[in-house]
Amino acid sequence: MLIDTHSHIYSEDFNDDIEEVLQNAYNNDVRKIVLPNIDSGTIKRLLDLSNAYPHVCYPLMGLHPTSVSHDYKEELSLVEYWLEKQKFYGIGEIGIDLYWDRTYINEQKDAFRHQIKLAKSRNLPIVIHVRESFNEVYEIVNEEQDGTLKGIFHCFSGDETEAKKVIDLGFFIRNWRSCDIQK
Ligand SMILES: [Zn+2]
C-alpha cells in the first residue's frame, strides 16, 4: 500500500475527472491521499472531497505561505475555527515561500510560527512548504522543536547539508520538485 502524502486533487482542475484520478491512484496501490489546504478559498472543495471519500482522502488544515498577505490574521482565525469544528490529520500546508514574492516575509514568518503552535497544542504533524527560504524555515522550526514537533519538508530543494539538518530536526523530506500550487 502506498500513501500519497501531498496532493491538491480537490482543486477545480480535477472537477471533470476526479473519479478517474482516484481510480488510477487505487490501481497503482495508492490507498490513502493526504490533502493539505491552501487558504479560505479552498476549504469547501477540500472538505467536499474528503467527505465523499473518507477512507481515501485525509484533509489537513492550514494557510499556505503563498496565500499570506495583509489579511493573514483573518485567514488564521478561519484555520482555528475549522480545527475546532472537525477532525484534521495535520496542519498544512504551512511554511515560507520567497520564490514568488518577498513582500510579506514577516507575515509569512508570523503565520508559520503561529500554525506550528497550533500543531503543537493539538499534537498534530505539520507539512512544511519551503521554497528559497531554507534558513528562515529552519530557524523557526529549530526554535519551536521541543521534541514533540513532527512532519514533512515538502518542496525541498536543498543540498545534502540542508537535508541532514532537516533529518536532525526529526523531519521527513518529500520530493525535490516545486510545490504544485503556484501563483
Ligand atoms: Zn502543496
Image (cartoon, rainbow, N blue to C red):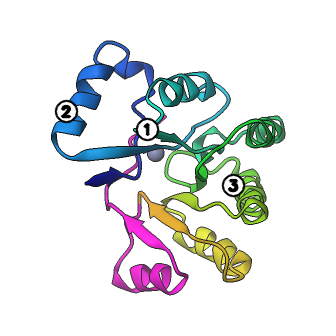
Give the CA separation, mark 2 to mark 3: 39 Å
Q: Earlier in the sequence, mark 2 or mark 1?
A: 2
Q: Nearer the viewer, residue 17 or 106?
A: 17
Question: Which residue has dot 2 on it?
Answer: 24
Q: In the image, what residue occupies the spot 58% across and 71% down?
A: 150
Q: Earlier in the sequence, mark 1 or mark 3?
A: 1
Indicate the quadrant where residue 81 lies. Answer: top right
Q: Amino acid at mark 2?
A: Asn
Single out the residue that lies furthest toward the left: 27
Q: Nearer the viewer, residue 70 or 169?
A: 169
Q: Residue 36's x, y, as percent?
A: 52, 43
Residue 59 is inside the magenta segment: no
Question: Which residue has dot 3 on it?
Answer: 105
Start and end of the magenta stretch?
Answer: 156-183
Image quarter hosting the N terminus: bottom left
Mark 2 neighbour class, 10 Å CA radius: few under 14, some 14 to 19, many 20 or more: few
Q: Amino acid at mark 3?
A: Ile
Indicate the quadrant where residue 45 lies. Answer: top right
Q: Which mark is residue 55?
A: 1
On screen, residue 169 above or below 34: below
Tag nearer the camera, 1 or 3: 1
Query: What secondary structure is found at the residue carrying circle 1?
Result: loop
Position of residue 121 in the picture relative to residue 40 (left or right): right
Q: Do the numbered discs 2 and 1 sit on residues whose CB atoms are within 8 Å? A: no
Q: Which mark is residue 98?
A: none
Q: Amino acid at mark 1?
A: His
Q: In the image, what residue occupies the spot 62% across and 51% down?
A: 102
